[in-house]
Amino acid sequence: MDKRTMTVTELTEIIKLTIDNSPYLGSVAVSGEISNFNHHFASGHMYFTLKDAGAQLKCVMFRFQNVNLRMKPENGMKVLCTGRISVYPQDGRYQLYVSDIIPDGIGALYIEAERIRKKLEAEGLFSEKLKRPLPQYPQKIGVITSQTGAAVRDIINIATSRYPLCELSVYPASVQGAAAVKTLVDGISYFNTKEHVDVIIIGRGGGSIEDLQPFNTEEVAYAVRGSQIPVISAVGHETDFTVCDFAADVRASTPSHAAELSTPDKAALKHKLSAQRDAMIASVNKTLTAQRTKLERMRTSRALTSLDNFIADRRVSLDSVSTRIADKLNIIRLRRKKDFETAAAKLQASSPLRVLANGYAYVEKDGRRGTCAAELSAGDRIKITMKDGTVSSTVDEVFLNEK
């Protein structure tokens, strides 16, 4: 057979056309584990390797297709990639051009749930500051779960036996499968907008990670946190927490535990009420005993057994008090009189009239009292006040003391 000589480019183009025209490689779904994952910062394209125990496959997912992914690919994640096989001429290798990625297997579900948990935790959705206390005595409890499962029977049986006064309303929801997320979210909306309840229990019995997947979604977490009514997450999987558990106000390990958390125990209430009743009775009896003692003391008092003598005693006491008051008033009067006499004597001693009586006088010029000879001049009209009258005079001459 004749050999045809061709360039590398020509050969690569033939191989590319052959693969592109293959009816088997135009649309394939390939499962494997992601490795060497690189989300290019500038272009937004995703580059990674899909591998299993026997081979590896280069993959690329362009930005316009990966922007709508519901999951974030990571190394070690088992996935199912849909796309087409073609050749990248510059490297001379075939690769999978990916159009969609979905988790494949339990490992992928765990990784995706952990990714969602970290994302919502970073947003502050699980903050303890957002947690609300449960009502102590709920009148009505809303339950969102399967109406045919064991979970709803456990909740009803335990809640009604613990607290018969409480009414339960069950919103039938799918708890696994494709329709579960919507019905769980719709149930929360229903109790927040159409039927008032005091607390909501959302959950199911135990199951595999695939069964619990609806409770590991962002939609359910946002709905739980957005509820105006306190929510108890009751997913019966004690060893693992779901995203719904973190978002709820309270996490219960099982639906039965949720029923216990949401209702008071009637036996404990009876015991508490009995103790309070006994305390009230004891308090009333103590008060009655004290009042009886007081009444008996009054009944046997002198005022009631011998009124005349009681009044006579009071008159004597009144006279005694009156005498003591009169004595105190007299003492006060004498003290005040003595203080007055002392003050009058001091005032008399400093009176100018007393000075005048001793032969002294004072001089006034123009209605103003003078104290110095230097204030007067020859010819000034002055008035001299003495002890028995005044004298008008004219100054003839002023003599000043030598200094």
Image: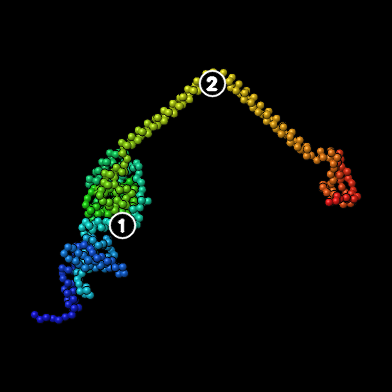
- On the rendered structure, is 242 left or right of 11? right
To which quarter of the image does residue 217 belong?
bottom left
Mark closer to the chain start, 1 or 2: 1
In the orientation shown, which residue stands out farthest toward the right?
396
Residue on which the image places disc 2: 303
Question: Residue 396 location, x and y as percent?
Answer: 91, 50
Q: Nearer the viewer, residue 92 or 347?
A: 347
Question: Residue 103 location, x and y as percent?
Answer: 23, 59
Colouring convention used in this rendered image of the protein: rainbow
15, above or below 296, in the image? below
Which residue is located at x 26 percent, y 51 percent? 240
Which residue is located at x 11 percent, y 80 percent? 3
SS of the residue at dot 2? Answer: helix
- Going by the numbered disc 1, the residue's amino acid type is Lys
Question: Residue 15 location, x and y as percent?
Answer: 17, 74
Q: Nearer the viewer, residue 334 or 3?
A: 334
164, above or below 101, in the image? above
Q: Image quadrant for the N terminus?
A: bottom left
Which residue is located at x 32 percent, y 52 percent? 247
Q: Which mark is residue 118?
A: 1
